[in-house]
């Protein structure tokens, strides 16, 4: 199937969204039987790109997925990369001496 469609598995899982060559591809929403959901981008049948995971109790978590796996959030932690890609610590993050 290419285009937009819906599919429900016999175990209660559901997908509604875009397809390419019979695989979830583009934007779509997937729901598990227990009420958990993923709303976001897909590539060749796997979560890929930006999306939102919704727990069974409705708690939402934005994130980024790569080939079906959620990536850990990037830590900014007051570190910048200089033009030569060397880490530089921002001065305001360095504790001053305690006298």
Image: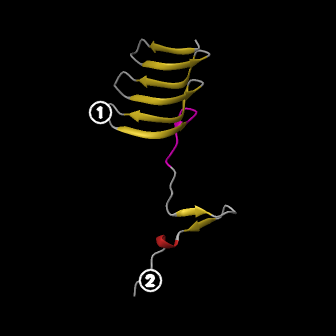
67 drawn magenta: yes
Horizontal and vertical percent position of residue 2: 59, 14
Above or below: residue 84 compared with residue 10: below
Q: Which residue is mark 1?
A: 57
Q: Residues within 10 Å of mark 2 (few under 14, many from 20)?
A: few
Task: Evaluate if marks 1 and 2 touch, with contact meaning CB atoms under 8 Å apart.
Answer: no
Residue 57 position, x and y percent, is 29, 33
Q: Which residues are magenta?
A: 66-73
Say which element carries label 2: loop
Whether the magenta-drawn stretch holds residue 55 is answered as: no
Q: Quadrant of the N terminus?
A: top right
Residue at position x 34%, y 24% in the image:
34
Give the secondary structure at mark 1: loop
> Are there few (<14), some (14-19), or many (20+) residues within 10 Å of tag 1?
few
Disc 1 to disc 2, C-alpha distance:
47 Å
Residue 98, placed above or below residue 54: below
The overriding secondary structure of the stretch rendered in magenta is: loop
Which residue is rendered at x = 70% and y = 63% of the image? 84
Q: Residue at x 52, y 51 (%)?
A: 74
Q: Which residue is mark 2?
A: 97
Q: Quadrant of residue 52?
A: top left
């Amino acid at each position: 199937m290419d285009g937009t469609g819906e599919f429900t598995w016999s175990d209660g899982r559901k997908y509604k969204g875009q397809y390419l060559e019979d695989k979830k591809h583009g934007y779509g929403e997937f729901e598990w039987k227990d009420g958990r959901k993923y709303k976001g981008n897909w590539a060749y049948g796997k979560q890929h790109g930006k999306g939102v995971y919704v727990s069974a109790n409705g708690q939402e978590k934005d994130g980024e997925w790569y080939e079906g796996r959620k990536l850990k959030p990037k830590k900014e932690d007051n570190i910048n990369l200089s033009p030569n890609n060397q880490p530089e610590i921002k001065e305001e993050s360095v504790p001053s001496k305690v006298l």
